[in-house]
């Protein structure tokens, strides 16, 4: 029991966990997805979020183009995607994985 308390209070372990969560959260901040995608390929947690964040960035970009042709539906879809993006960012900061509907399945098939 004392060993677990010692490891939990070790600042090196805390910084490492916080850095992983931050890198995973960067995956959902637009083009900053490139940072974890290029620097953390060996970390399964961060790379999972980076793949999903990349697919989300592509979907958001395509939705912005669709807004030009379909204002109402495009704007609604954009709002939904931004909400999902925010939820995924918060989940990443909490150290959890949340598969975004449809986007998550596409990300699983995405080979990088």
Image: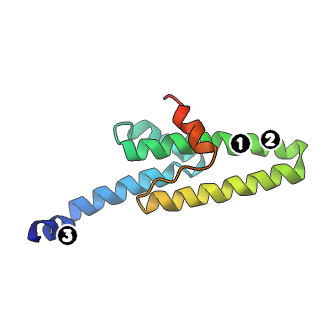
CA distance for labels 2 and 1: 7 Å
Residue sitting at 65 percent across and 39 percent down?
Answer: 58
Instruction: Look at 20% across and 69% down and name the residue there.
Output: 9
**Image location (x, y in percent) of residue 111:** 50, 28
Q: Is residue 41 left or right of residue 102?
A: left
- In the image, residue 107 sits, relative to residue 2, either above or below, namely above
- Say what secondary structure mark 1 lies in: helix
Mark 2 and mark 1 residues within 8 Å of each other at the beta carbon = yes
**Dot 3: what SS?**
loop
Which comes sooner in the sequence, label 3 or label 1? Answer: 3
**78 on left or right of 105:** right
Q: Name the element at disc 2.
A: helix
Counting from the top left corner in percent of width and height, residue 80 is at 71, 56
In the image, taking residue 38 as reference, residue 102 lies left or right, namely: right
Instruction: Give the residue furthest to the left.
Output: 2
- Identify the image quadrant of residue 76: bottom right
- Disc 3 from disc 1: Cα separation: 42 Å
The quarter of the displayed image where residue 3 is located: bottom left
Structural crowding at the residue carrying mark 2, measured as other residues with C-alpha within 10 Å and reported as few (<14), some (14–19) or many (≥20):
few
| Label ID, residue 65 | 2
- For marks 3 and 2 on the same chain, the one whose residue lies earlier in the sequence: 3
Residue 46 location, x and y as percent?
Answer: 41, 46
Residue at numbered disc 1: 61
Q: Nearer the viewer, residue 54 or 35?
A: 54
Write the residue at 37% across / 53% down: 20
At x 55% / y 38%, what residue is drawn? 107
Q: Is residue 87 above or below residue 37?
A: below
Residue ID for mark 3 = 9
Pointer 3 with pointer 1, Cβ within 8 A: no
């Amino acid at each position: 029991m004392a060993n677990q308390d010692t490891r939990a209070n070790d600042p090196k372990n805390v910084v490492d966990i916080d850095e992983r969560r931050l890198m995973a959260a960067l995956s959902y901040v637009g083009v900053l997805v490139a940072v974890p995608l290029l620097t953390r390929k060996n970390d399964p947690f961060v790379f999972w979020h980076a793949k999903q964040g990349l697919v989300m960035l592509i979907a958001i970009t395509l939705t912005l183009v669709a807004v030009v042709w379909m204002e109402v539906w495009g704007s609604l879809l954009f709002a939904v995607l931004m909400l999902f993006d925010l939820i995924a960012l918060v989940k990443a900061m909490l150290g959890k994985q949340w598969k975004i509907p449809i986007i998550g399945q596409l990300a699983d098939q995405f080979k990088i």
